[in-house]
Image (cartoon, helix red, strand yellow):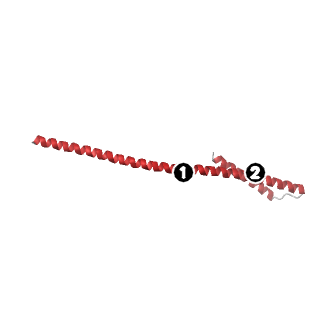
Amino acid sequence: MNTKNRVFKKLAEETKVELSVQKIELGSMQQLTAQAKECRSTLSKLLKIRDSFYKEQKSLKSFGEILQSQGKRLRELTSDLKKKIDDLGVDTPKEINYFFDEANSFEATGKDAVKRTR
């Protein structure tokens, strides 16, 4: 009888070990599942941020192109004004240089904005 009790006792111990191993494996699977879900959520957020970045990048490029265009237009208008003033034989006001400087600034800022989108 004593041997029989020892055998049953030993079997009970082995069964407990197997159950605890399965419990650990189940816990690990649950952790992996939770981590995978968190990774999918993070990836989704990153993709939204990327899409937003590309949209803003396009807007910045468009803004830069418009700014360059307006700078060129301001330069043309200022040149025309200066030419008309010179044709009239009147002294060119100092302020006209301000408009040339602004045209340069618009073009430079626009070029920089476009350059940053590459």
Percent across and percent down for residue 82 are: 84, 55
Residue for point 85% across, 57% down: 92
Give the farthest residue toward the left. 1
Are the residues at dot 2 and dot 1 in contact (C-beta closer than 8 Å)?
A: no
**Amino acid of disc 2:** Lys
Q: Nearer the viewer, residue 103 or 12?
A: 12
Q: Quadrant of residue 2?
A: top left
User: Which label belongs to residue 84?
Assistant: none
Q: Given this view, does label 2 or label 1 mark the residue nearer the observer?
A: 1
The answer to whether 6 appears left or right of 106 in the picture is left
The answer to whether residue 86 is above or below residue 6 is below
Pointer 2 or 1: first along the chain: 1
Q: Pointer 1: residues within 10 angstroms few (<14), some, or many (20+)?
A: few
The answer to whether 32 appears left or right of 91 in the picture is left
Residue for point 26% across, 43% down: 18
Give the farthest residue toward the right. 89
User: Under tag 2, what secondary structure?
Assistant: helix
Percent across and percent down for residue 106 are: 72, 53
Name the quadrant of the C terminus. Answer: top right
**Amino acid of disc 1:** Ile
Residue for point 80% across, 54% down: 77
Q: Pointer 2: residues within 10 angstroms few (<14), some, or many (20+)?
A: some
Q: Quadrant of residue 16?
A: top left
The Cα atoms of the two marked residues, 2 and 1, are separated by 34 Å
Name the residue beneath numbered marker 1: 49
Name the quadrant of the N terminus. Answer: top left
The reply to whether residue 52 is visible in this rendering is yes
User: Under tag 1, what secondary structure?
Assistant: helix
Percent across and percent down for residue 57 are: 61, 49
Name the residue beneath numbered marker 2: 72
